[in-house]
Amino acid sequence: MTAAVSISAPPAFPLAQRMSRMKASAIREILKVAERPDVLSFAGGLPAPELFPVEAIAQAHAEVFAEEGRAALQYSATEGYGPLREWICAHLAKSGLHAATDQVLITNGSQQGIDLVAKVLLDPGDVVVVENPSYLAALQTFSGYEASFAVVGSDNDGMRVDDLERLLLVVGRRPKLIYLVPNFQNPKGTTLSLERRRELVRFAQKHRILILEDNPYGELRFRGEHLPSLASLDTEDVVINLGTFSKTLAPGLRIGWAVGPRELIRTLTVAKQAADLHTATVSQRATARLLSRFDYDANLEKLRGVYGERCQVMLAALEKHMPAGTRWTHPEGGMFLWVELPRGMSADTLFPLALEKRVAFVPGSPFFAHEPRSEFMRLNYSNRPPELIEEGMRRLGAVIASQQT
Ligand code: PMP
């Protein structure tokens, strides 16, 4: 299996140069086969659908149509719906991130935040510093803007921030952006330590490099202490913080936000206007209405309880079923963990064999910006109940053991 799938252009319609660098997501291709009903898949990055507050969301939509239908169906401001931006400000302030309403831009999920930041910042050839491995769809976005990558390794405490000064010398030019997922990273599930957070912000301030802090999972902590966001540690306007309701309410709402320095948010707003005018008015108003009376914190507690249990079940099942030489991360929150296979084994080779045994994962290679490494796999634990997690790890352990010489 190749790490990524190229887009082939029909000769009659030559595509823009940049599309040759932008790969179709390998994960989407994998999911097509992994989501067969007979396969126990741990490949997707899906929240647990049984935890979506469907009735409360439906009720909020019904009220929006009944009471403010015309406004909800009208065009609206690019910045986003005022009461929703205000709720986000008040909510972020609770965890120490203080921002004014005009420092918040509502986006179509945090994915659009990544895209807009890349669009306003990156010229072809500009350098983006990324973790190795990194969130695949961010790599895809940056590639689409013809960025080049400077990769910095990571360990169980997240990005190797101590390596950044050396990296600057090697790269020889100032990066435009440092992109990272500090909490329960996708794909590894690891979290950036407090010390490294401070060091990273100091580094970015010293060199005047913008940090893009992508934080879709921060509120899904089920173990350990909350750590301050990079944005809350920053005193010199070098951080853009991205958030989303995709993992805490439902991804189908497509509501995320970017919080950052006022001037940059204004520039992102201009870019968003050119992209899609605004995020769906109905969705924004219904979400604002929902949040005005919904117990968001209780909902988070529920999610943390369920995901914490599922993670624990997966860790115990890995312990029980994985052959010696297999290692994995121990997330304190989020939805993923990262498995390192016994020496010499390739997750790409393993994938079709696992499918034969009706279990699926995402091979780790597409998450690497430079040379892909094939000895890793990403497992999602949020989307399956405990008994299926146990059964899935049993099947996976047997496949891995069968490949050991
Ligand atoms: N960033 C990361 C690290 C993610 O894992 C995801 C979702 N898989 C996103 C951004 C995009 O999420 P959304 O656009 O739904 O907010």
Image (cartoon, grey):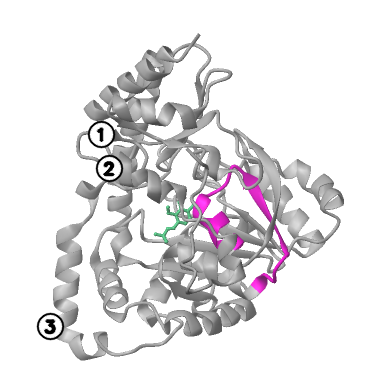
Choose top left, top right, bottom left or bottom right for residue 380.
top left
In the rendered view, tell whether residue 80 sits above or below residue 258.
below
In the rendered view, tell whether residue 289 sits above or below residue 402.
below
Which is nearer the N-term, disc 3 or disc 1?
Answer: 1
Q: Which residue is mark 2?
A: 35
In the rendered view, tell whether residue 397 sits above or below residue 191.
above
Secondary element at tag 3: helix
Q: Residues within 10 Å of mark 2 (few under 14, many from 20)?
A: some
Q: Name the residue: 14% across, 61% down.
A: 55
| Magenta part of the chain | 121-143
Residue 49 seen anywhere in this rendered image of the structure: yes
Find out whether residue 120 is within the magenta segment. Answer: no
- Relative to residue 296, is residue 144 drawn left or right? right
Disc 3/disc 1 C-alpha distance (Å)? 43 Å
In the rendered view, tell whether residue 324 sits above or below residue 221.
above
Q: Which residue is mark 3?
A: 66
Q: Nearer the viewer, residue 381 or 395?
A: 395
Residue 39 numbered mark, or none: 1
Q: Residues within 10 Å of mark 3 (few under 14, many from 20)?
A: few
Choose top left, top right, bottom left or bottom right for residue 353.
top left
Amino acid on which the number 1 mark rests in the picture: Val
